[in-house]
Image (cartoon, grey):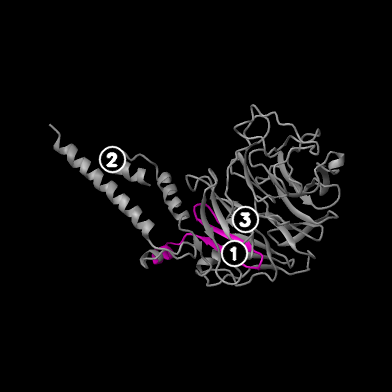
Amino acid sequence: MHQLLFEHAITKFNHSPLDVLKVYNEYKYSRLDNLDAMKGHFPMKPHQASVNTLSLDPLYNRYLFSGGGESSVKLWDLKQQVEVEELEPIYILPSKSVHKFGITHIKWWSDNGLWLSSSFDHTLSVWDANEMQHVHSFNLGSRVLHFDFEDHGRNSLVAVCADGGVGGLRLLDLRTLADAHTLGGGGKLQGGFGYMLSCRWSPANPNLVVGGSQDGYCIGWDIRRADGCVFKMDYNLTTTNYKTNTRQLLLHESTPKAHNGGINSLLFTDDGAELITLGHDDKICVWDMTSAEKPLNKQINFGPLVRNKSTQHISMALSPLSETELQYLWFPSENGEILIYRLEDGKLVARLNKNGSTLNRRTTSIVYAKESSIKYYSGCKDGTISVWGYNSLLDSQKSGDGLDFDNGNLGTLACETENSDILDRIHDEIEANKIRAKNTEF
């Protein structure tokens, strides 16, 4: 921001409006708050049990699915937020109607024509989004923990993580309704990798799918190949030592590990150049996916506040590439806080939490609202859905009161005053230089 002010003052400002918007959005990310008290908020408790998953439609960014631990599914029209005081679901799938146990994951198809849901009742269900009719169910014989498919609809395969059977990733074909193939199955004694807690398709390569196992293995497969996996992520293979790394695996290791514990969340950047993994070892790792041989650990330190022991899949969120100069990672911590980190260096930017007795209830899923909205939705284990983001009215009220609450922590405006003084001094110095240059002209 200081650089833009300086260039504007000396008439060398040649930045596009998008660059200015990115700088302004950076300011908004430093002033995030809970928006549950604003108009158009969700009901006090939309689900009787935990909200296990949220999914926003990719076409209009308008329709939000929420799946609960009591096996119900609700659809919300977010356009109502500007019209009503409290949102009401426009569609409800009652408990025990199709899924008998808790919902584990929901995801829209890329064209909004289909949506898929999985449950602890061993099934993956396919739905017609236009008629809201149940089309087909795959019975996998084990609890379905997570699933994913290619975001742009370039193939009809669904990768499924189940906690039984032969392990690995199950590939289901929506065209033929067949259980097509199993990747990495058979258990460790047969060359497999145990059962998977999370999976993700690459946005850059429609044939690449990555799975994170209960034992800390993170494996990538090319679905066109039949000769095993493409790569196995190694925590000790980093961007600084990959050329000289000659590490030998320990005697009890047959495969390098990405984490010292289960991996229950995977997240690609929009361009597929980086992969973010979350493990039960309380670590977040960022991997460079553009290397020639295998992904490299970028060794970004996210600090000591990361807490993650959940056995279910946790959905993190990432701000869009085009919104800010640097991307921000939203991580739901074990203690109920939502921690926001700068992806480039792991710096903690904000710690968000809700007031009240449910402070220590963990958030399980976070989704981003839409481009340049600076708004996020989160589902919590206490059955609530919260809204987070920037609101100019709340920001002006805090500034007008002369107090800075900083997400619930009362403080003074000393830091803000200091920043204002710095800008004033820069402006005065620029004006003085202009006058001095004018007086010295011959």
Secondary structure of the residue carrying numbered label 2: loop
Q: Which residue is mark 3?
A: 57
Place of residue 36 in the rendered image (x, y in percent of width and height, measured from the top left): 53, 68
Q: CA distance from mark 1 to mark 2?
A: 46 Å
Please tell me the numbered disc located at residue 77. Answer: 1
Q: Position of residue 85 (x, y in %)?
A: 52, 72
Q: Position of residue 31 (x, y in %)?
A: 45, 58
Residue at 62 percent across and 55 percent down: it is 57
Report, in whole angstroms, how far the alpha carbon at label 3 lies from the one at label 2. Answer: 44 Å
Q: Mark number for residue 394? A: none
Q: Which residues are magenta?
A: 369-397
Q: Is residue 356 above or below residue 59?
A: below
Q: Is residue 139 left or right of residue 423?
A: right
Report the front residue among 195 and 298: 298
Whether residue 375 is in magenta: the answer is: yes
User: Which amino acid type is shown beneath numbered disc 1?
Assistant: Asp
